[in-house]
Amino acid sequence: MRSPRPFIYLLGLLLPPLIIGTTLTFLTLSQLMIRKAPPPYKGSLPAAPELSKNSKLRAVILTSNVGTEITDLLGPLNILAESDAFDVYTVAPERRFSPTTADVSFLPDFDLSQAPQADLIVLPSVLDFENPILVDWLKKHAPKAQAVLALSEGARIAAQAGLFRAKIGTAFFTAIEDLKQLEPTARWLPNARYVVDGPIISTSSITGGLDATLQAIEIVAGQTAAQRATTRLNLVRNQQLDPYFSEPKSVELAVQKDRGWGDVWGSDGFFQLFMRGGYDWNKRRTATLLYPGVSELGLAASLETMGRSFRMFVSVASATRVPIRTQHGMILISNSELQDIYEPHLFVIPPGASDQDLLADPALKQWLSEAHPLIKDFKTAAAGQSFQQSFALLAELEGDPLAQFVGRTLDFPASQIKPVRPRLEDELALWLRPLLVGLLGMWAVWVGDRWLKGKAEEARRITQDTRLQTADAANRA
């Protein structure tokens, strides 16, 4: 009979790195992606905006008081405002500072009872998508809107409101099976970047929402308005990356293979997640500056890209913790002040301001003069290139494999991520750690094996001695 010892040694080599890596990956995910409740804001709230009486269309973004996806919130707001065709408002069940998926909170313009009627309704991903208050508001207002844009898991609210009945739609792939149960009359296409079916536009990913926002502008306000936003922001419009329309001209997309975890994250996606989450122990601390006039899209791109790398603890800080208006009037408040940020390795200044504007704040001027992290200054860059710049920075710091991995999780076009050669010393350290854990596991098996052999030999000797003593006693008798 063949000895099982080689198999046991193999298990000693493989199981400890797998168990430890998986455990540390889940701990990393909990630290990086589960946000603590923001500190309460004790000051008086800024006044709600007055509804404009001009001839512009109205876009209303339906948000949550529990948690709203940061790029789904800020990206469309920035693009819609730059089209110069919409007045953009945010609404939520209550008008109070509410958390996002990043380290920053926002103040909705109105509560739902004061929300204006919209020509375009935008549904970002929210944490409380089963909230009946949100669903009921959408049921009431969607029939009067020209179009509804459901971003990623925002399709869950739209489906509960009956907007996908007998329609074609898409959503983030983890929501597709639930949506099939929720609205079985709909045809769900997880393989499409975004889907247009009449007045309902839906998206399957974070960056796909930017392209879909331009499509929504074109549907509601015309091609000129969409082109205006594209030009002003210097956006790359990725229409060629499989938008699906209900017209026959693109029906061939419907028969493409459904996109699952492996297709979205790539063949090495889970391996990257396992290695970065479990064995990349030197996490960077990254701070992003929140300041008056910051570009909404620029802020979101920095937070989204760095935050999904599983390599960085990302925080948002302002000179003082007070409400701050972004470039197009959204009111944000950071969870931290600059003085609370402990020695960041990287400090990012998003697009939106000049040196003169930034240095007008004495507290910020003082901090910048004393701080010594790596400062990446994008404040004068085009907001529409913010994702490209953030990916270039991530590739520069951490190497191309990680940047490509994050790009796949956001469905960002790989052709727009500038390749950078990975730093060999970092990659070597990353591989050595699980190898050393595996070798330690084999050593533990060897020690255990030696101990068991010793115990077995000792038991054999005792048994043999006992037999000899018994035989000797029998001979004497």
Image (cartoon, rainbow, N blue to C red):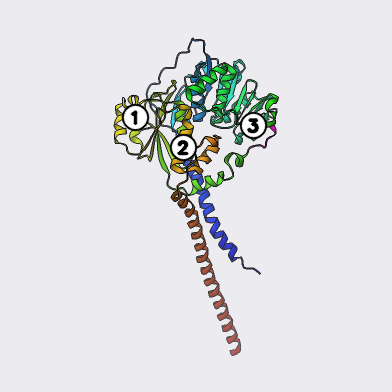
Name the image quarter holding residue 296: top left
Residue type at the position of mark 2: Ala
Magenta stretch? 253-259
Q: Amino acid at mark 3?
A: Leu
Asked whether, in this view, residue 420 is left or right of residue 472, the answer is left
* 315 horizontally vs 175: left or right: left
Of the 4 image quadrants, the one containing the N terminus is: bottom right
Residue under the point 48% across and 24% down: 233
Residue at the disc numbered 3:
179
Query: Is residue 434 visible in the rendered structure shown here?
Result: yes
**Which residue does the numbered mark 2 point to in the structure image?**
392
Residue at numbered disc 1:
319
Q: Is residue 289 above or below residue 57?
A: below
Q: Determine whether the residue tagged by mark 3 lies in a helix, strand or loop.
A: helix
* Label 3, label 2: how far apart the Cα atoms are: 35 Å
The first of marks 1 and 2 along the sequence is 1
For the residues labelled 1 and 3, the Cα–Cα distance comes to 43 Å
